Amino acid sequence: MEVDSAISTIHSSAKHLLPELEIYCYLLILLFLIDQKRYKEAKICSSASIVRLKNLNRRTVDVIASRLYFYYSYSYELTGDLAEIRG
């Protein structure tokens, strides 16, 4: 039916978001958590975002990635665990 094909199209497009959009959402959530002083949750979110970012190989994500790396280190600094991420 027409309805079934429309619903399956919506579900399949929702599964494949743009990586730029996904990384930007990580950044927004991370900023929100830091503003709310929920530093442990911000640390978890930033770690997850960096793992996802390392799986991408797109030059279009570089600008957002630079900000994400900054807040990644900042969230570890706020929790006192900055030595964990030193390379």
Image: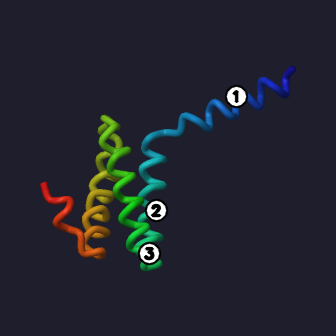
Q: Which residue is drawn at 20% across and 68% down?
A: 82
> At 48% across and 47% down in the image, what residue appears?
21
Q: 60 or 69, which lies in front?
A: 69
Determine the residue positioned at 34% across, 56% down.
47
Is 12 displayed left or right of 53 in the figure? right
State the quadrant of the C terminus: bottom left
Q: Do the residues labelled 3 and 1 touch (CB within 8 Å)?
A: no
**x, y (%) of residue 53?**
34, 45
Name the kind of residue labelled 1 in the image.
Answer: Thr
Give whichever of discs 3 and 1 has the lower sequence position: 1
Residue 78: image quadrant is bottom left
Question: Residue furthest toward the left?
Answer: 87
Numbered badge on residue 9 = 1
75 horizontally vs 21: left or right: left
> In the rendered structure, which amino acid carries the disc numbered 3?
Arg
Residue 18 vs 39, above or below: the answer is: above
Q: Nearer the viewer, residue 63 or 82?
A: 82
Q: Which residue lies furthest to the top in this view?
A: 1
> Sequence order check: which comes first, mark 1 or mark 2?
1
Q: Mark 3 points at which residue?
A: 38
Name the residue type under label 2: Leu
- Look at discs 3 and 1 and give the one toward the viewer: 3
Mark 3 or mark 2, which has the lower sequence index? 2
Disc 3 and disc 2: Cα gap in Å?
14 Å
Image height of 37 relative to 27, above or below: below
Quarter location, residue 4? top right
Locate the N terminus and report the quarter of the image it occupies: top right
- Circle 2 sits on which residue? 28
How many residues crowd around disc 3 within 10 Å: few (fewer than 14), some, or many (20 or more)?
some
Residue 42 lies, in percent from the top left, at 40, 67
